[in-house]
């Protein structure tokens, strides 16, 4: 299980400093074109990082630093955005999805289900991203690499053929909530197709290919 970040260092934002919750951190990075920030599990680590150059910490994993740098420098990618993706061990199989901040890879949310499909995960990830932004009063684009999920969002309907069983009944409850959210809420955030061929894997990719 990944360590939960409790402190967020903002090197370049509206008000650089160390923040103790994600909501306040987001307010200080939203709309900043050359944002630099990262989460840390302890105050000591955060203070040490804030005193140093952000280049040492940029990206959520050392092996991904070069790819995040290329995203940051790519004029075709909207840096101030969320990216979502899903992974499935078998299809159907154990399914999870997550949302991350595009330019740094910092995780915003993650969910896991004992049985599902990749397309369902992609669909739920987008809706989760929209609902998350509504709750936290954000308005930034969402990237997905799934054409199918985009079509389901447009239809406000998950068109999966996964059967409803005892194993999937909890997942179908979540799907129903997601469909209802789309039908009962308006949103202005653009949902954009991530160009994997040109830009590489989406930052929310689980790296299991």
Image: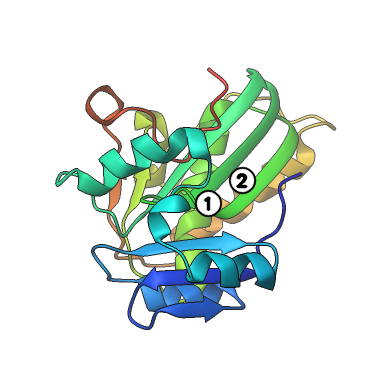
Look at the image and tell me in which quarter the N terminus lies.
Answer: top right
Quarter of the view holding residue 98: top right
Instruction: Residue at 49% x, 71% y: name it.
Output: 51
Q: Which secondary structure lies at badge 2?
A: helix
Q: Which residue is mark 2?
A: 175
Query: In the image shown, does 135 or 199 lie closer to the viewer?
Result: 199
**Distance of mark 1 from mark 2, alpha carbons?**
6 Å
Query: In the image shown, does 23 or 87 lie closer to the viewer?
Result: 23
Q: Is residue 193 left or right of residue 20?
A: left
Tell me, yes or no, if residue 144 can be seen here: no
Q: Is residue 162 left or right of residue 50?
A: right
Above/below status of 177 relative to 137: above
Instruction: Residue at 26% x, 31% y: name it.
Output: 199
In the rendered structure, find residue 187 and report the number of the disc placed on it.
none
Q: Which secondary structure lies at badge 1?
A: helix
Kindly check if marks 1 and 2 are in contact, taking CB atoms under 8 A apart as contact.
Answer: yes
Query: In the image shown, does 30 or 135 lie closer to the viewer?
Result: 30
Above/below status of 39 relative to 175: below
Instruction: Residue at 59% x, 54% y: name it.
Output: 109
Instruction: Residue at 28% x, 71% y: name it.
Output: 31
Q: Is residue 68 left or right of residue 78?
A: right
Q: Position of residue 22 (x, y in %)?
A: 56, 71
Above/below status of 113 relative to 93: below
Q: Which residue is mark 1?
A: 179
């Amino acid at each position: 299980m990944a360590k939960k970040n409790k402190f967020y260092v903002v090197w370049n934002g509206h008000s650089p400093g160390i923040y103790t919750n994600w909501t306040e951190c987001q307010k200080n990075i939203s709309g900043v074109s050359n944002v630099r920030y990262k989460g840390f599990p302890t105050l000591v680590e955060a203070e040490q990082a804030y005193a140093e150059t952000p280049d040492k910490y940029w990206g959520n994993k050392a092996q991904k630093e070069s790819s995040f740098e290329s995203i940051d420098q790519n004029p075709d990618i909207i840096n101030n955005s969320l990216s979502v993706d899903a992974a499935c061990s078998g299809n159907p199989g154990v399914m999870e999805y997550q949302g991350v901040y595009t330019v740094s890879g910092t995780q915003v949310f993650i969910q896991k289900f004992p049985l599902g499909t990749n397309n369902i995960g992609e669909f739920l990830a987008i809706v989760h991203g929209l609902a998350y932004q509504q709750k936290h009063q954000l308005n930034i684009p969402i990237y997905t690499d799934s054409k199918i999920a985009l079509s389901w969002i447009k239809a406000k309907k998950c068109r999966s053929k996964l059967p409803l069983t005892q194993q999937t009944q909890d997942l179908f409850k979540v799907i129903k909530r997601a469909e209802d959210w789309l039908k009962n809420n308006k949103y202005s955030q653009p949902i954009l197709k991530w160009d994997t061929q040109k830009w590489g894997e989406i930052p929310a990719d689980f790296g299991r290919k």
